[in-house]
Image: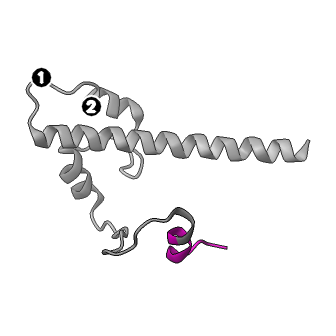
């Protein structure tokens, strides 16, 4: 069963009184990455961005960074954090499946 917005309201007590947060489809992945990170990987598939590329390009915020640069670096770190979180969750699910068999 998938929780509804009302379930979230009831369980967490969150106010639900504004516009919904939704994911809009991305029609041009290259443009989307460029708009959010200002640079685009030149190699590989744009649906997966390698950690090594993120580390090379966003390891340390440059001195005197502009507010736009701060936002872009933050978006890069959030991208990495969400990918890491997803990967860990996937590995935990695999471990649970193995333990269920034992």
What residue is shown with label 1? 63
Please, is residue 71 above or below residue 47 in the view?
Answer: above
Quarter of the image with the N terminus in it: bottom right
- Taking depth in this image into account, of 44 and 50 the one nearest to the observer is 50
- Seen at 39% across and 48% down, the residue is 45
- Front residue of 76/10: it is 10
Q: Which callout, 1 or 2, points at the residue further toward the start of the chain?
A: 2
Q: Which SS class for mark 2?
A: helix
Q: Is residue 5 magenta?
A: yes
The coloring applied to the image is one colour
47 in magenta: no
x, y percentage for residue 84? 49, 39
The residue positioned 53% from the left and 68% from the top of the image is 8
Query: Which numbered mark, 1 or 2, is in the foreground of this view?
Result: 1
Residue 88 placed where, x, y %? Answer: 59, 40
**Could you tell me which secondary element the residue under label 1 belongs to?**
loop
Q: Which residue is mark 2?
A: 58
* Residue 42 in sight from this viewpoint: no
> Where are the magenta residues, as a range?
1-9
Give x and y (percent) for residue 90: 63, 46
């Amino acid at each position: 069963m998938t929780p509804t917005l009302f379930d979230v309201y009831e369980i967490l007590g969150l106010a639900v009184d504004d516009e919904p947060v939704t994911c809009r489809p991305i029609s041009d992945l290259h443009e989307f990455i460029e708009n959010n990170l200002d640079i685009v990987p030149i190699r590989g598939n744009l649906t997966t961005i390698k950690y090594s590329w993120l580390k090379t390009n966003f390891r340390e915020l440059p001195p005197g960074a502009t507010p736009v640069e701060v936002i872009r670096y933050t978006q890069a770190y959030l991208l990495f954090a969400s990918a890491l979180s997803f990967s860990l969750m996937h590995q935990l699910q695999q471990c649970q499946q193995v333990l269920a068999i034992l």
